[in-house]
C-alpha cells in the first residue's frame, strides 16, 4: 500500500464549505489587502498563541527579515544561527549584510546546542535565532540566560512550531520576536505563502507593522525603507477556517509520533527523535536518524515500497555554496554535518490512517531486518 508523505486533499475536503465561503466573502468584499479578514486573523492567532501582538506577513522568511530589520541588525553585526535548519533562517541574516555565526545542534533534538552558542557569542553578536525544528521547542530557559549574559536579542524561528509549548507556554513569545510560517506543509498551512511575527513589545509590534507596508505613514510618506511584506486577505480568510482545527491536527500528529516511538524502538541502526521534559512538540516532522551511512538506501527502499519520505535537510547551511565565505570561518558544526547525512522524515500528517502508519513501520523494520 502506498503512503504519501503529505495529503492536503484529506485535510481540505471536510473544510470545503467553509473554505468556499471564506473565498466568496473576500471576492465579494473587494478588500484584498488588509481589512477585516486580516484583522480578525491577527486577533484570533494572537489569542491562540497567547501573545498581545500578532503581525501578519507574506511568509516566514519575510517574518525573519522584518524581525531583524526592526531590531536594526545589519553590517558588522553577528547573529548566532544553527547550521542545521531550513535555508530561510540564515538567508535573512545575510540579506541584511550581517554575519551568521554557525552554531551546532544537539543530535537527539536537532535543536540549538546552547553550550556551543555560548562559546561562539562575541562582542559583535547582536542576536541568536533558536529554531524550534520539526515542531519541537528549544530550551528557552537556557537560551534566556545566554541572551541576558551577552545582551543579545532572541528571535525565535517558530516556522515549524505553531502551538508548541515550552514549560506550558506557547513558543514565539519568549524572544523579542517569534516568526511563524504558514507554508502549505506547516501544521497550519495556507493556500500559498503566508507568515507571522508575534511579540510582547508594543514598540516592536508597531515597527514590524510599519516595515511590512513600505515604512509608510501617512499614505505615501516614508520615513524608513520597508517593503511589501503583507499577508493577502484571501490567505487570512482561508487560514481562519483551518485555525479552529489546529489543536486536533497537533493531537493526531502526536498520536502518530507516539505510535512510531513505540513501534520503532529497539531497531538497531535507527535513532528516534527525542522530546525533552517540559516540551510539547507539534511534530511538524517525525525525523529518524539512520546510522552506518544507510540513510539513502532506506529512502530508496521506502520509495520502492511507495512510501513517501523527505530529507530535511541534506546540506547544512555552512556548506551551502551561497554561504561560502560567510560566517566567522572555521566554526566547528560537526553534528550538523552528520545529521545532514543521516536524517530522514517519514509521514506524520494528521490524516494518516492506522493502516498507513503500520505500513510505514513494517517497511522500515523490513529494511533493517533484510540488511
Ligand atoms: C525553520 C524554517 N524557517 C523559515 C522558514 C521560512 O518560511 P516560509 O517558507 O514561509 O518563507 C521555514 C519554512 O519553510 C522553516 O521551516
Image: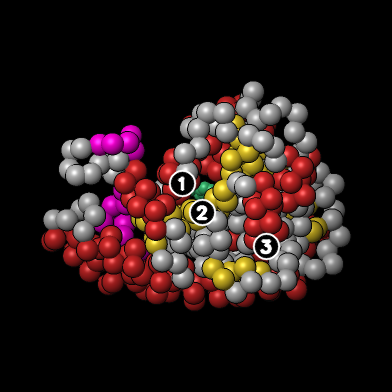
**Whole-percent x, y for residue 159 in the image:** 51, 54
Q: Distance between the residues labelled 3 and 2?
A: 14 Å
Q: Who comes first in sequence, dot 3 or dot 1?
A: 1
Q: In which quarter of the image is the N terminus?
A: bottom right
Residue 230 belongs to magenta span: yes
Q: Residue 67 carries which label?
A: 1
Report the Cα–Cα distance between label 3 and label 1: 21 Å
Q: Which residue appears at 60% of the width and 64% of the height?
A: 283
Q: Is residue 211 magenta?
A: no
How packed mark 1 is, by other alpha carbons closer than 10 Å (few <14, some 14-19, many 20 or more), is: many
Residue 62 in which image quadrant: top left
Task: For mark 3, give the secondary structure.
Answer: helix
Residue that label 3 marks:
141
The structure residue drawn at horizontal position 52% and vertical position 60%, both measured from the top left corner, is 172
Does mark 2's beta carbon lie closer than 8 Å to ligand 1? no
Q: Can residue 17 be seen in this view?
A: yes
Q: Main secondary structure of the magenta part?
A: loop
Q: Which residue is drawn at 59% across and 44% down?
A: 127
Relative to 226, 359 lies left or right: right
Spot occupied by residue 324 in the image (x, y as percentages of width and height): 63, 25
Outermost residue toward the top in this view: 325
Res. 161 in view: no
Q: Which mark is residue 176?
A: 2
Packing grade of label 3 (10 A; few <14, some 14-19, many >=20) is: few
Residue in view at x 64 percent, y 41 percent: 80
Label 1 near ligand 1 (CB < 8 Å): no
Asked if residue 350 is positioned above or below residue 311 in the image, the reply reads: below
Point out the stretch of residues depicted in magenta: 222-239
Residue contact at pointers 1 and 2, CB within 8 angstroms: yes
Q: Position of residue 57 (x, y in %)?
A: 36, 51
Amino acid at each position: 500500500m502506498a503512503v504519501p508523505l503529505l495529503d492536503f486533499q484529506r485535510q481540505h475536503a471536510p473544510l470545503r464549505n467553509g473554505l468556499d465561503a471564506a473565498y466568496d466573502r473576500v471576492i465579494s468584499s473587494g478588500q484584498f489587502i488588509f481589512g477585516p479578514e486580516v484583522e480578525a486573523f491577527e486577533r484570533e492567532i494572537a489569542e491562540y498563541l497567547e501573545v498581545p501582538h500578532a503581525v501578519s506577513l507574506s511568509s516566514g522568511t519575510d517574518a525573519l527579515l522584518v524581525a531583524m530589520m526592526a531590531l536594526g541588525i545589519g553590517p558588522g553585526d553577528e547573529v548566532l544561527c544553527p547550521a542545521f535548519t531550513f535555508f530561510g533562517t540564515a538567508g535573512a541574516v545575510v540579506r541584511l549584510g550581517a554575519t551568521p555565526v554557525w552554531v551546532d545542534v544537539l543530535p537527539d533534538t536537532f535543536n540549538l546546542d546552547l553550550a556551543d552558542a555560548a562559546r561562539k557569542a562575541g562582542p559583535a553578536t547582536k542576536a541568536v535565532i533558536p529554531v524550534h525544528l520539526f515542531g519541537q521547542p528549544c530550551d528557552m530557559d537556557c537560551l534566556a540566560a545566554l541572551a541576558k549574559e551577552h545582551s543579545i536579542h532572541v528571535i525565535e524561528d517558530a516556522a515549524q512550531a505553531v502551538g508548541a509549548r515550552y514549560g506550558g507556554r506557547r513558543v514565539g513569545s519568549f524572544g523579542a520576536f517569534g516568526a511563524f510560517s504558514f507554508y502549505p506543509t506547516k501544521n497550519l498551512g495556507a493556500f500559498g505563502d503566508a507568515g507571522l511575527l508575534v511579540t510582547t513589545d508594543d514598540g516592536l509590534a508597531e515597527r514590524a507593522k510599519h516595515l511590512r507596508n513600505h515604512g509608510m505613514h501617512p499614505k505615501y510618506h516614508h520615513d524608513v525603507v520597508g517593503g511589501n511584506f503583507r499577508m493577502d486577505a484571501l490567505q487570512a480568510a482561508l487560514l481562519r477556517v483551518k485555525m479552529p482545527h489546529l489543536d486536533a491536527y497537533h493531537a493526531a500528529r502526536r498520536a502518530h509520533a507516539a505510535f512510531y516511538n513505540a513501534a520503532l524502538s529497539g531497531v538497531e541502526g535507527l535513532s528516534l527523535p527525542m522530546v525533552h521534559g517540559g516540551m510539547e512538540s507539534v511534530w511538524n516532522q517525525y525525523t529518524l536518524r539512520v546510522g552506518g551511512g544507510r540513510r539513502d538506501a532506506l529512502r530508496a527502499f521506502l520509495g520502492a515500497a511507495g512510501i513517501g519520505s523527505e530529507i530535511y535537510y541534506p546540506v547544512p547551511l555552512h556548506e551551502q555554496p551561497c554561504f561560502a565565505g560567510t560566517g566567522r570561518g572555521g566554526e566547528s558544526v560537526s553534528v550538523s554535518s552528520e545529521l545532514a547525512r543521516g536524517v530522514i522524515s517519514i509521514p506524520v500528517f494528521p490524516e494518516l490512517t492506522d493502516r498507513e502508519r503500520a505500513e510505514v513501520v513494517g517497511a522500515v523494520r523490513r529494511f533493517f531486518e533484510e540488511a
